[in-house]
Image (cartoon, rainbow, N blue to C red):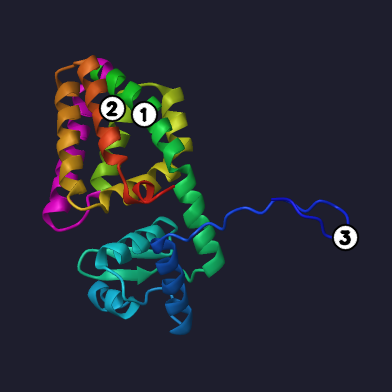
């Protein structure tokens, strides 16, 4: 509905966007860090204690911590909990969170376009040494998961090894250009319940096809994998 104030027609009113729960929790975490004058290297309270203080579920708190980890505010370490990396500015943290959620679909599209092709090329062009690097990345991720971690390092190494094995300098350059954005989606995805092991199984299927030099099979396996790892809570909760 339009209305007049002193003559000119004012801009039409729009519905006020309701903040998502994890945005509210991010704001509270930023306030907690400021109120307690925390400095880099300080640990936040254990998740169970922090969730009780905030009156939220551990799942919702975990999602908010992941959002801050993606921004480089905290580092979530197995056995150590969340450790402050840099002090956040509340308004910027929430703005960055919303921007991250908004660009996730485009990052997923880019991964599908690039990595499906790279997997097919890797199956055609890989050397024995490059296949060994892919297998080494699988072993790294498996060891990380067995130790209770999410497998972020092994996951990163696996996709990098496939990019190298594809022998396409232009596609590799494009992957490098969006590597920071891909890392955001990787952390977000591997923080989902049961996702690390499911992701590892997807990697094994891709590796098998590359080992067999099955280009079409490698592309299909990568497409299936990207679709699976792209199912993240940040998108399910209403982008």
Is disc 2 placed on a helix, strand or loop? helix
Percent across and percent down for residue 236 are 34, 47
Crowd rating for badge 3 (residues with CA inside 10 Å; few <14, some 14–19, many 20+): few
**How far apart, in angstroms, are the residues tagged by discs 3 and 1?**
53 Å
Percent across and percent down for residue 42 are 36, 77
Crowd rating for badge 2 (residues with CA inside 10 Å; few <14, some 14–19, many 20+): many
Direction left: furthest residue: 146
Nearest the camera: 178 or 221? Answer: 221
Tell me where residue 113 sits by quadrant: top left
Which residue does the image show at 27% across and 17% down from the upper left? 125
Question: Magenta segment range?
Answer: 124-151
Question: Which residue is labeled 3 in the image?
Answer: 6
**Label whose residue precedes the other's in the sequence (3 or 1):** 3
**How far apart, in angstroms, are the residues tagged by discs 2 and 1?**
6 Å
Is disc 3 placed on a helix, strand or loop? loop
Question: Which residue is labeled 1 in the image?
Answer: 112
Is residue 194 found left or right of 4 in the rendered image? left
**Label whose residue precedes the other's in the sequence (3 or 2):** 3
Q: Which mark is residue 223?
A: 2
Which residue does the image show at 19% across and 35% down from the upper left? 203
Is disc 1 placed on a helix, strand or loop? helix
Nearest the camera: 76 or 227? Answer: 227
Pointers 2 and 1 in contact (C-beta within 8 Å)? yes
Which residue does the image show at 69% across and 50% down from the upper left? 1
Say whether residue 97 is magenta: no
**How far apart, in angstroms, are the residues tagged by discs 3 and 2?**
58 Å
Q: Which tag is nearer the camera, tag 3 or tag 2? A: 3
Percent across and percent down for residue 219 are 27, 21
Pointers 3 and 2 in contact (C-beta within 8 Å)? no
Q: Which tag is nearer the camera, tag 3 or tag 1? A: 3
């Amino acid at each position: 509905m339009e209305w007049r104030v002193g003559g000119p027609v004012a801009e039409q009113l729009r519905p006020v966007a309701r903040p998502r729960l994890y945005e509210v929790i991010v704001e509270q975490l930023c306030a907690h860090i400021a109120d307690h004058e925390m400095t880099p290297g300080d640990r936040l309270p254990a998740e169970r204690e922090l969730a009780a203080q905030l009156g939220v579920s551990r799942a919702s708190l975990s999602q908010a911590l992941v959002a801050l980890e993606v921004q480089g505010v905290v580092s979530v370490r197995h056995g150590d909990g969340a450790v402050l990396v840099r002090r956040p500015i509340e308004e910027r943290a929430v703005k960055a969170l919303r921007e991250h959620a908004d660009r996730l679909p485009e990052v997923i599209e880019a991964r599908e376009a690039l990595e499906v092709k790279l997997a097919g090329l890797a199956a055609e062009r890989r050397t024995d040494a490059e296949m060994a690097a892919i297998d080494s990345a699988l072993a790294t991720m498996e060891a990380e998961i067995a130790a209770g971690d999410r497998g972020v390092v092994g996951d990163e190494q696996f996709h990098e090894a496939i990019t190298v094995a594809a022998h396409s300098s232009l596609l590799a350059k494009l992957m490098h250009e969006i590597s920071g954005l891909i890392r955001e989606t990787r952390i977000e995805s591997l923080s989902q319940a049961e996702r690390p092991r499911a992701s590892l199984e997807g990697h094994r299927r891709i590796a098998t096809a590359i080992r067999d030099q099955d280009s079409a099979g490698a592309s299909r396996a990568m497409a299936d994998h990207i679709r699976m790892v792209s199912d993240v809570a940040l998108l399910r909760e209403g982008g």
